[in-house]
Every structure is written in structure tokens, then in C-alpha cells.
Amino acid sequence: MNAIALPAIEFHTPQLIGKPVEKLVRKLRDVQEIFSNRKACASLDPETVVYEVESWFPVTEDTEGGLFTGITHILPGQVGNEYFMTKGHFHQIRNRSEYYFGIQGTGMLLLMDEDRVTRAEKMYPGSIHYIPGHTAHRTANTGNTVLSFGAVWLADAGHDYETIRQQGFSRILINLHGAPALVKNEQVPE
Ligand code: PAN
Ligand code: ZN
């Protein structure tokens, strides 16, 4: 008879638990350059946690066809009128796609193609988002509570943060009179 085992990992909303989950904490001091308003950023405590990522890597990064999973938790907050958000990236292997799914809280997923056309999708518990290849992705917490979302991506995708660090997104998400608005990023070329 075959042994029946518990799965290797469990989904305990909203946390990934079990071995060997790896946890990454991004504080304001780690991500300060992603925010447009540097002055507002400098007035906040650099030790403020902006987001945390819990990931499970069941195979090595060079495993073609392998999958990784993780949960990101973005704290509520703003730098000036810009919501707390992730660094954002293209995948190193550009055609690698990804799924995101909303677990708790509300937010927005920014998607920018290689022609720098940016759109946004609302995130909420139960929302599912297909991120096509060749598309940079960044998430922002637009609510007053923690935004948690799951992700599933290809193990060999890799993360290219440098392109976004240099060129930014063509649009930024700001709190305009109490509601999220996707507006032109004046600090980068169109
Ligand atoms: C996600 C992201 C996570 C954090 O797991 O890595 O939300 O965002 P940054 O990596 O942009 O800081 C994912 O998209 N993986 O591919
Ligand atoms: Zn990704």
C-alpha cells in the first residue's frame, strides 16, 4: 500500500508556513528609491516595514518547468501621496508568465509592457491575475489593512530589478482625493 502523507506545505491564510519557507523583509531603507517623493520618504522612519515575502522554492532556480510559490504582505501606508508598493520587476527570462491571487486587503497590480504601456488591475480577496511574459509587475496596497496576495512563477524566470530601477514605470499610483489614480510618472520618459 502506498503511504499517504500530508502535503509538504499548507496554505494558512494569510501565511505560508512549514519548512523551508524563506522570508524576505523589505524596509523603507531598502526600497526608498522606488518612491517619487524623496522628501516625504526622508521624513519617515527608514526601519518601517513596507512589505514581506514568504516563498517556497521546492526546486533549484535553474529547473526548467519547475514552479515557485510565495505570499507577499504589503503594509498599509503612503510615501507622500504614493501607496506602499513593491519594487517591481520584469522576469530575467522575459517570456516567463506568473499568476497572482488576492488573499486579504485591497490593492492594485500595475502591469507595464515592453513598450512602457502601463495598466492596472484591482486586487481583492479572490481576485486572480495573469501576468503575461514581457510584462513588468508591481503591486500597491491601496487600503487601510495589510494586502496579502499569493504568487506562482516559473522557477527559472529570474528577477530583473535593474531595468525598473533605471527606467521606472511609466505610470505611478497615487491617492488622489481618497481614491487610487494611475497618473503619468513625471520622473521618467514616456
Ligand atoms: C513576487 C514578487 C513579490 C515582491 O513573488 O517577487 O511580490 O515584489 P518584488 O520582487 O518586485 O520586490 C513575484 O512577482 N515573483 O516573480
Ligand atoms: Zn514576478
Image (cartoon, grey):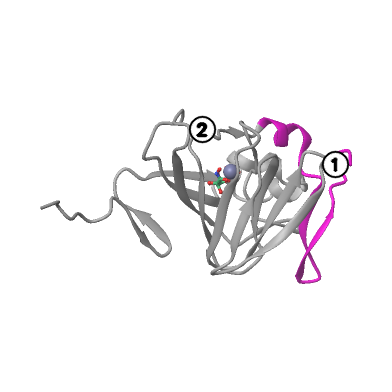
Q: Position of residue 88 (x, y in %)?
A: 65, 43
Position of residue 145 in the picture relative to residue 85 (left or right) = left
Amino acid bearing label 2: Asp
Q: Residues within 10 Å of mark 1 (few under 14, many from 20)?
A: few
Res. 156 mark: 2
The answer to whether mark 2 is within 8 Å of ligand 1 is no
Position of residue 173 in the picture relative to residue 100 (left or right) = right
The residue sitting at 75% across, 46% down in the picture is: 112
- Quarter holding ligand 2: top right
N-term-proximal mark, 1 vs 2? 2
Is 75 above or below relative to 145? above
Q: Is residue 171 magenta?
A: yes
Q: Position of residue 64 (x, y in %)?
A: 48, 32
Label 1 secondary element? loop
Q: Is residue 23 visible?
A: yes
Which region shows up in magenta? 162-190
Foreground residue among 33 and 47: 33
Q: Specify the quadrant that holds the C terminus.
A: top right
Q: Which residue is mark 1?
A: 187
Residue with the most extreme front position:
1
Foreground residue among 1 and 99: 1
Task: Say how many tags the image has.
Answer: 2
Label 2 secondary element? loop
Q: Position of residue 134 (x, y in %)?
A: 70, 39
Is 105 above or below relative to 109? below
The residue sitting at 65% across, 34% down in the picture is: 94
Position of residue 81 in the picture relative to residue 63 (left or right) = right
Amino acid bearing label 1: Gln
Q: Position of residue 81 (x, y in %)?
A: 76, 59
